[in-house]
Amino acid sequence: MKKILVAVDGSDASLKGTRKALEWGKPFGAAVTLIYVVPPMVLPGDAPWARMDEIHAAELKRGEKVLAETLAAAGETPLNVSTRSVLGPAAETISELADAEGYDLVVVGSTGKGAVKRMLLGSVADRLVHTCTKPVLVVR
């Protein structure tokens, strides 16, 4: 296991996922990448004041802050850790990146929502497990 991709959203669950990825990667000297995905926004057509490029740039900047905070909270690590903040649908973007860049493992935190809430709200972890061609570790 040489490359691990970790989905981060600023939640306690994603921090647990980050710590688990660092723990699992340590014996292998794995390169770990933390990724924050900003979902695309669709605003009503009658909102001419909204500049989508500015909104996306602000969200990507916020993502970089979340990544830095997560990395700081995870503690010291001897591993090669990098971060990325990208725009796109979360599960699909993570899955495509894992394939394109040859990651060996994808790690995602789960808040442990029940089936009914997951049906209503959606779940990146659930979608990744079903769509990603790479192994996915869901950390609770």
Image (cartoon, rainbow, N blue to C red):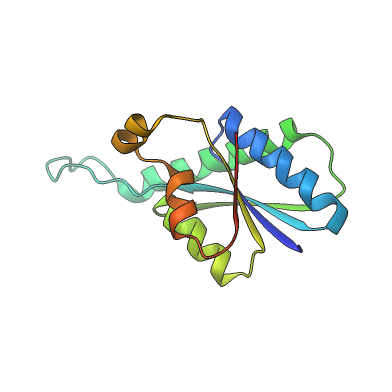
Q: Position of residue 81 (x, y in %)?
A: 75, 51
Q: Extreme left residue here?
A: 46
* 1 sits left or right of 102 in the view: right
Residue 76 position (above or below residue 137): above
Q: Position of residue 38 (x, y in %)?
A: 44, 46
Q: Position of residue 130 (x, y in %)?
A: 44, 55
Image quarter where the N terminus lies is bottom right
Q: Extreme front residue here?
A: 115
Q: Quadrant of residue 80?
A: bottom right
Q: Quadrant of residue 108?
A: top right
Q: Position of residue 21 (x, y in %)?
A: 71, 46
* 104 sits left or right of 129 in the view: right
Q: Residue at x 25, y 46 (%)?
A: 42
Q: Residue at x 77, y 48 (%)?
A: 24
Image quarter where the C terminus lies is top right
Q: Is residue 57 visible?
A: no
Residue 32 position (above or below residue 47): below
Which of these two is toward me, 91 or 37? Answer: 91
Q: Residue at x 76, y 45 (%)?
A: 22
Q: Residue at x 65, y 34 (%)?
A: 15
